[in-house]
Image (spheres, rainbow, N blue to C red):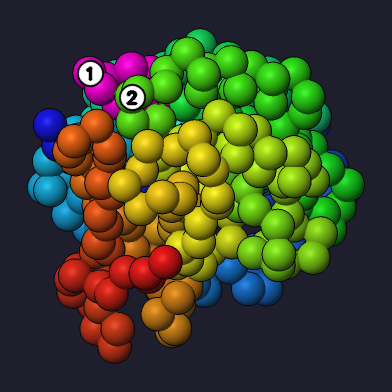
Amino acid sequence: MSYRIAHLSDPHLSPAPFPGGAELRLKRFLGWVNWKRSRERLNDTEMLDRLVADLRAQNPDHIAMTGDAVNLALRSEFARAAQWMAGLGAAADVSFTPGNHDAYVRDALPTLARTFAPWTEGYRFPYLRQRGEIALIGLNTGVPTLPFLATGRLGASQREALAALLKETAGLARVVMIHHPPVRGGKAPLLRGLDDAAAFEAVIAEHGAELILHGHTHRLMAHRLPSRATRNAAGFVPVLGAPSVSAAAPDAAHRACYYLIDLAHEGGLWRTSWRARGLAMGGREIVAREAPAI
């Protein structure tokens, strides 16, 4: 049995509208200024459309989108994000996890929940979507924060529910989808990490998983988490981070791409392999790119 997942993250659909009227908040205004000063010049909508078309042409069994669909969590941004998510494929074949920009301010949370309910089993976390021998588990680390912070948090109740789901689905290929990098050790910049990463690591160590997917850092990266309970043939849990899928960045680590990940069931264990496709270095073509090894 083999199953293919396409993983993309952080499209930050552009342009970011000015947050005027009743939606104006200090954090939104500062975020808009930051967008105009830096991120706007990197986001390439035409390239993003071609990358999504290339992804769909690969015919993955499932698509994992790990957050930050929007920039300032404005109502107009959510409306556009819903259309963009629908363009990825049928809701049953696409899963979503919220990022910090999706949960940018507290008053955006009800609209966030309504918008992404089709891709999150009614916006309940953690959620489980079982596809044959694959258990897709979505988590929510998107919480409103003060200006200049981009941290995430699961919280005790979500971690406890995750532990129960991992135990319930032992034997399946458990694919955990999360926005913030769920590991310690400098994998996220200061004031941008997962507050309870150590507690998350403890859950994985005890109950296992076969693969973890995340975004947030806008960087192509791969690392591992130890677990005696994993049934990944590598003997550890691979953790793959995708860059911003809309970023025409000049360096390979941050330049737009997505993962294609294959899970194969062999002899009671799960073997994972992955490759990347994205914007060519020094060109505009969508090509095979070097994927990070662990």
* Residue 232 visible in image: yes
What residue does disc 1 label?
132
- Picture layout, residue 215 above or below residue 252: above
Which secondary structure type mostly characterizes the magenta part of the structure?
Answer: strand
User: What is the distance, in whole Å, between disc 2 and disc 1 at their CAs?
Assistant: 9 Å
Q: In which quarter of the image is the C terminus?
A: bottom left
Mark 2 neighbour density, 10 Å: few (under 14) some (14–19) many (20 or more) = many
**Picture residue at 81% right of the left edge, 59% below the top:** 191
Answer with the quarter of the image where residue 170 lies. top left
Indicate yes or no whether the magenta region holds residue 210: no
Q: What residue type is labelled 2?
A: Leu
Q: Which amino acid does label 1 sit on?
A: Gly
* Residue 244 visible in image: no
Helix, strand or loop at mark 1: loop
Answer with the quarter of the image where residue 108 lies. top right
Q: In which quarter of the image is the N terminus?
A: top left
Number of marks in the rendered image: 2
Q: Nearer the viewer, residue 83 or 199?
A: 199
Residue 270 in the image, given as x and y percentages of width and height: 27, 39
Indicate yes or no whether the magenta region holds residue 130: yes
Q: Which of marks 2 and 1 is in front?
A: 2
Q: Which of marks 2 and 1 is nearer the N terminus?
A: 1
**Picture residue at 45% right of the left edge, 75% below the top:** 253
Residue 293 in the image, given as x and y percentages of width and height: 37, 69
Residue 52 in the image, given as x and y percentages of width and height: 26, 50
What residue does disc 2 label?
172
**Picture residue at 64% right of the left edge, 17% below the top:** 161
Query: Taking 112 as reference, is 12 left or right?
Result: left
**Residue extent of the magenta highlight:** 129-136
